[in-house]
């Protein structure tokens, strides 16, 4: 998870026939934006990259858990 803490600004689209529920998609987009903004803020505040990555990864895990519950 820490390796992906540098969230992708342009996530891949799902393959045809493998759509995502609109609510889950909105939640994931909100997550992506928040994590990008938060990591940028930590970087601008002078946090070391490894600290920013770990903090972002921890929050990302919470978002993934919430999205997983939505699509159950």
Image: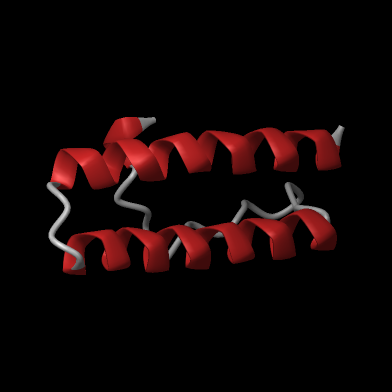
Q: Is residue 28 above or below residue 71?
A: below
| Quadrant position of the N terminus in the picture | top left
Quick check: 7 left or right of 48?
A: right
Q: Is residue 57 above or below residue 23?
A: above
Quick check: 21 left or right of 47?
A: right
- Residue 9 seen in render: no
Q: Is residue 37 above or below residue 51?
A: below
Along the line of sight, the residue nearer the viewer: 50 or 32: 50
Q: Position of residue 3 (x, y in %)?
A: 28, 34
Q: Position of residue 58 (x, y in %)?
A: 45, 35
Quick check: 65 left or right of 32?
A: right
- Residue located 72% across and 65% down the image: 26
Colouring of the image:
secondary structure
| Quadrant position of the C terminus in the picture | top right
Q: Is residue 47 above or below residue 29?
A: above
Quarter assignment of residue 13: bottom right
Along the line of sight, the residue nearer the viewer: 46 or 22: 46
Along the line of sight, the residue nearer the viewer: 18 or 65: 65
Q: Position of residue 31 (x, y in %)?
A: 57, 58
- Residue 23 seen in render: yes
Quarter assignment of residue 56: top left
Report the label total: 0
Along the line of sight, the residue nearer the viewer: 46 or 56: 46
- Residue located 40% across and 38% down the image: 57
């Amino acid at each position: 998870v820490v390796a992906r803490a540098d969230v992708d600004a342009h996530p891949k689209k799902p393959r045809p026939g493998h759509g995502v529920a609109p609510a889950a998609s909105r939640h994931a987009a909100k997550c992506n934006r928040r994590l990008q903004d938060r990591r940028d803020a930590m970087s601008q505040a002078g946090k070391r990259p490894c600290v920013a990555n770990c903090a972002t990864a921890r929050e990302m895990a919470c978002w993934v858990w919430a999205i997983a519950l939505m699509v159950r």
